[in-house]
């Protein structure tokens, strides 16, 4: 929709949430027609992989909050770490002081990070981490006398945040339709989704096509004008897009060959989601110039994020002709001592067997969900590690997504909730990324619930004349 259409276009269907009265709390991604009136399902408590809603219904937390509650809900160790740190030192200014937890966490993250990513700048979440990485790239190129080298290459389907610059990289149409963005600073590449690749191409040819596209962009825009490529190793909110084999490494190598910084956005994929603290090297074989992270670093118990930064980049700054140049960037809550204390304890839990568990159980999780492909509504179940997506299509041959207004994801989610499972609906898709502590019987149960709920959704759609699969 274009803003000029606002008086004439048909009224779109509103969120199923209650619109009975005005409410003081405005939550993320509201629609204009119901803003300030919606009440999303209130959740009262959580324990392990479960949350309990206001009505006392116990629900499996399929998306682990927002891909973040990696060690599960109600971990006493994390609550104790938070309380102990608050009683010892609740806050100290990162401008003038350091705290022990932030120093320790920096050391431990540097030890886990690949290559020479020996430094970390802490932020308050994922958007601020991506924003920091991009502002650092801009600063670095200014200091190094190449102020024109600032274009950022992103991809269709990407999600990198909700601050102005990070949001400008978002590649899902509904994220940009009504929002301003810094489009002159960004070039978009195709989404590396093998399921929606052009017909007639096999996966290997699709990978060639994608890498060629990037090569052509570099030729057209000029490497001297491109500052960075930002990429989620697996696009999360875009629908758990697992790119074709070899793609990540080849895109990284193109960046290296052209002096373009490769920023891996591991806000979702780090801290065990793919079985490792960071996935870039261990899963994809690359050593990015920066890695952004958030979410699982504290398992969502405290808002914290950060950017791992290559020692080489800092060395280049120290040797520049502008030692007086200031990276005028920092957040009041950078290096927050409570967040860092929680992250240290969270890392203990991950290192103490949970990463291993995640690696061991991932094949079972993927195989179990894959059985849903036998349902006529399901075009593909894809994923890696403990993240997966059920992609529904109107017909399996043409792989066309169902019309947006069918809101298949929401219908499936509603039926799943009746049976005790929360999933994350994304238009025609459902995303599942449970706490890493999930067990095989719990995975079986999750798949059973999804299967029954998708069958029920097929019946509903057929009854309403919305699908004839
Ligand atoms: N990057 C990725 C890959 C994300 O998935 C998200 C959030 O979902 C963000 C960045 C933004 O993180 P936050 O919501 O913590 O600001």
Image (cartoon, rainbow, N blue to C red):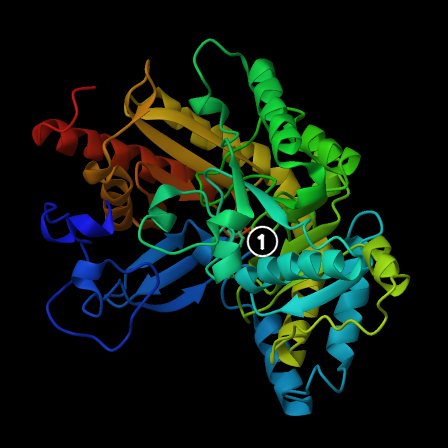
* Number of callouts: 1
Front position in the image: 199 or 169: 169
Q: Is residue 249 above or below residue 446?
A: above
Rendered location of residue 22, percent (x, y): 16, 74
Residue placed furthest toward the right? 319
Image quarter where the N terminus lies is: top left
Rendered location of residue 425, percent (x, y): 33, 45
For ligand 1, tell me if the residue under mark 1 lies within 8 Å.
yes
- Residue 68 seen from this side: no
* Label 1 sits on residue: 267
Front position in the image: 415 or 292: 292
In the rendered view, does 75 fall on the left or right side of 308?
Answer: left
Q: Is residue 410 above or below residue 101?
A: above
**Residue drawn at (50%, 34%) of the image:** 241
Rendered location of residue 273, percent (x, y): 59, 47
- Examine the image and state in which quarter residue 76 appears: bottom right
């Amino acid at each position: 929709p274009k803003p000029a259409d606002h008086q004439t276009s048909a009224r779109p269907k509103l969120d199923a949430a209650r619109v009975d009265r005005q409410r003081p709390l405005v939550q993320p991604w509201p629609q204009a027609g119901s803003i300030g009136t919606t009440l999303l399902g209130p959740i009262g408590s959580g324990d392990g992989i479960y949350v309990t809603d206001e009505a006392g219904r116990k629900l499996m937390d399929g998306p682990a909050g927002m891909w973040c509650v990696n060690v599960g809900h109600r971990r006493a160790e994390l609550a104790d770490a938070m309380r102990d740190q608050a009683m010892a030192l609740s806050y100290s200014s990162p401008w003038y002081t350091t705290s022990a937890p932030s120093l320790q966490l920096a050391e431990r993250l540097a030890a886990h990070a690949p290559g020479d990513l020996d430094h970390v700048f802490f932020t308050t979440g994922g958007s601020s981490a991506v924003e920091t990485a991009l502002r650092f790239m801009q600063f670095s190129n200014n200091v190094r006398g190449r102020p024109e080298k600032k274009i950022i290459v992103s991809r269709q389907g990407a999600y990198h945040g909700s601050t102005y610059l990070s949001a400008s990289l978002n590649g899902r149409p509904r994220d940009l339709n009504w929002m301003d963005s810094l489009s002159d600073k960004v070039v978009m590449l195709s989404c590396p989704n093998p399921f929606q690749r052009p017909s007639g191409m096999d996966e290997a040819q699709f990978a060639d096509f994608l890498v060629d596209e990037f090569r052509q962009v570099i030729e057209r825009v000029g490497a001297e004008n491109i500052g960075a490529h930002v990429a989620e190793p697996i696009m999360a909110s875009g629908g758990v897009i697992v790119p074709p084999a070899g793609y990540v490494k080849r895109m990284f190598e193109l960046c290296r060959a052209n002096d373009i910084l490769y920023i891996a956005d591991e806000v979702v994929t780090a801290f065990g989601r793919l079985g490792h603290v960071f996935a870039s090297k261990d899963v994809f074989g690359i050593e990015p110039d920066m890695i952004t992270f958030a979410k699982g670093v504290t398992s969502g118990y405290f808002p914290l994020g950060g950017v791992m930064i290559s020692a080489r980049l800092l060395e280049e700054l120290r040797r520049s002709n502008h030692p007086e140049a200031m990276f005028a960037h920092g957040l009041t809550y950078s290096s927050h001592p409570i967040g860092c204390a929680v992250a240290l304890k969270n890392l203990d839990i991950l290192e103490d067997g949970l990463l291993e568990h995640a690696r061991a159980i991932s094949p079972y999780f993927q195989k179990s969900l894959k059985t849903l492909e036998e349902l006529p509504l399901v075009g593909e179940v894809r994923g890696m590690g403990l993240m997966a997506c059920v992609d529904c299509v109107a017909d399996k041959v043409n792989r066309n997504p169902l019309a947006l207004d069918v809101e298949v994801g929401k219908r499936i989610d509603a039926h799943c909730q009746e049976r005790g499972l929360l999933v994350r609906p994304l238009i025609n898709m459902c995303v599942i990324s449970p706490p890493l502590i999930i067990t095989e019987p719990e995975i079986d149960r999750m798949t059973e619930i999804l299967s029954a709920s998708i069958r029920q959704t097929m019946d509903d759609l057929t009854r309403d004349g919305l699908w004839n699969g």
